Amino acid sequence: MQGEITALLKATLTEGVRRGDLKFGEDVPIVLNMPPQKEHGDYATPLALSLAKLEGVPPRVLADLLVSILNQLESASHFIEKIEVAGPGYINFFIKKEVGHGHLLEILRQGAEYGKTDLFTGKKILIEFVSANPTGPLHVAHGRAAALGDAMSRLLRAIGYQVDCEYYINDVGNQMALLGQSTYCRYRELFGEKIELPAEAYQGDYIIDIAKQIKETDGEKYLPGQDDLFFGRYSYQTILSLIENDLRAFGVHFDGWFCESTLHQENKVSEAILLLRKSGVVYDADGAVWAATTRYGDDKDRVIKRSNGELTYFASDIAYHKNKFERGYDRLIDIWGADHHGYIARVKAAVAAMGYSADRLDIVIHQLVNLLRDGKPVAMSKRSGEFVTLKEVIEEVGVDATRFFFLMRRSDTSLDFDLEIAKKSSDENPVYYVQYAHTRVCSILRVAKEQGILMDKETDVSLLMLPEEMELIKQLSLYPDLIKMAAARLEPHRINFYLLELAGMAHRYYYKYRVMTEDMALTKARLALISAIRIVVKSALDLLGVSAPERM
RNA sequence: GCGCCCAUAGCUCAGUUGGAUAGAGCACUUGGCUUCGAACCAAGGGGUCGGGAGUUCGAAUCUCUCUGGGCGCACCA
């Protein structure tokens, strides 16, 4: 609908110029918005306000002129009920009810496909997220990243992208050795030795569990000589499979698990450095090898190979991003916790230095999660090993509520997650509010079906005349544009807010009116409406990875 | 000290490329189930959009500055 009105306004400007009434036509950007007040119509444009100065005509006069031209345009009559000039010079559009009715039929026709488009069909996109080091279980902040990445992948698929989700595993470096040492210490402890854990050791109980497993299967086999390699590898694999299980339980699917070690094995890191060297951004200084990332907007140059010969993590990252592009992706998305935001500039710089346009890479930062219980913070300290895992949260409040809460806020604001509220099945809990709306609609459809009342080709949706019905239809008709915007901006939280609004309208409608009435024709028309509500609510919940139960 | 993010109702937060009187939920007060599910609905109060300056016909939105908070500033990962 917005598109049609915008086109109409463009045509108006062109016609105005042709007649000589206007000086400006084509290049004026056309703003269209939805007035907060119903009396101001379905859509409104401040076009006359912005154009008034250029044209040298008072806004209201200009608005009247535009409307008079508009009214003469052939195409306007098809969908516009009336046009008004209001306030300082706004042009308000009132859309014919038939447009809404047509839209409703279109939703029913398209079903689950409604709202989805093929705008970016043929484009490939890679989203990398979570990528937590396999040195411990996932905690709540990782859960937020998981929910975000998964929802984004669904959103992007809905506008046609071919999306792959990937988890990057840091299986190289000191941390693996440290992990091995940590487990080894716990292992010896199990045989009664008093052990001082290394200062940097991983201290969670999960390390003790792993040590117990080793003891159970192999007894004291590894006691005599410390074998970091074995302990590191064993711990890493155990933890990684825990992570995989948690993500699966959370309903988050990854298409690929990419090991940093493969980059080294296949010489990808040195190849990436070579590429940078060729483009002249690599130099040697102080015995180390540097990348001149400042040339691409970073605030300092970065070491990629230390003077002791070891490659830095950044070097792997450069190679990894090169590898992603080489795999044929048109766009890359990285989702990082706020504690990594300092790396954005250098990674983007590296990407640019390798000759890839930096805006093919989006880095989404999410702030951390404050876990609360009844409004009070839940103590979390990673250092002491006492932190709340994603698994614990899912087990306590369930997947649906956890996902909905994680996605309810803009990713760049910190998130308060109250376990008690998330568990409540009451109006304080937005998840149930939305799901309940779906359930109620399903319930009516069930009753209708039992009575043998079904929509058919003769169903006359033009009987839907109530203001609440028109508002519902309008809200439903916004869904395709919502998907486009949420996907374009990588902002899944918009779906949550849309759902809450739609659910509210559905609840109010449900409360105030009956769908099953004595009037069979009206009943069928209303069944059509709630069927459309069901389609959209389910579709939107799907985008969030939240279930749409038919009974609760 | 430098950089990034955030600041909107008592609390938690929405707010589209700058547009009309800034919205919702919770909390608080009051009312509503013989009805397709009350996990719901209705009514009410509540705001210098952190402060200040600027750009503009017009600013929560853009620019600058200050304050407060979070997070980064390694030849760590």
Image (cartoon, coloured by chain):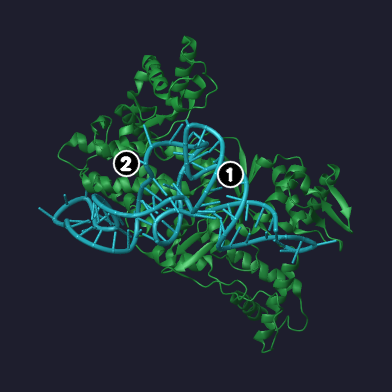
Chain colours: A green, B cyan
Image quadrant where one finds the N terminus of chain A: top left
- Disc 2 target residue: A531
Mark 1 and mark 2 in contact (Cβ < 8 Å)?
Answer: no
Q: Chain of mark 2?
A: A
Q: Are marks 2 and 1 on the same chain?
A: yes
Instruction: Look at 38% across and 51% down and name the residue there.
Output: A548
Q: Chain of mark 1?
A: A
Please name the amino acid that badge 2 sits on: Ser
Q: Using the rendered view, name the quadrant where residue A356 is placed.
A: top right
> N-terminal of the two: label 2 or label 1?
1
Q: Helix or strand or loop: what does disc 2 sit on?
A: helix
Q: Is residue A549 left or right of residue A456?
A: right
For residue A490, say whether it is visible.
no
Q: Give the x, y percent position of residue B77.
A: 72, 63
Please name the amino acid that badge 1 sits on: Val
- Disc 1 target residue: A163
Relative height, residue A237 to residue B61 (above, below) = below
Q: Helix or strand or loop: what does disc 1 sit on?
A: strand
How far is mark 2 from mark 1, CA to CA?
A: 30 Å
Q: Nearer the viewer, residue A17 or A421?
A: A17
Q: Nearer the viewer, residue B28 or A9?
A: B28
Instruction: Look at 55% across and 56% down and name the residue there.
Output: A146
Instruction: Look at 25% across and 35% down and name the residue there.
Output: A525
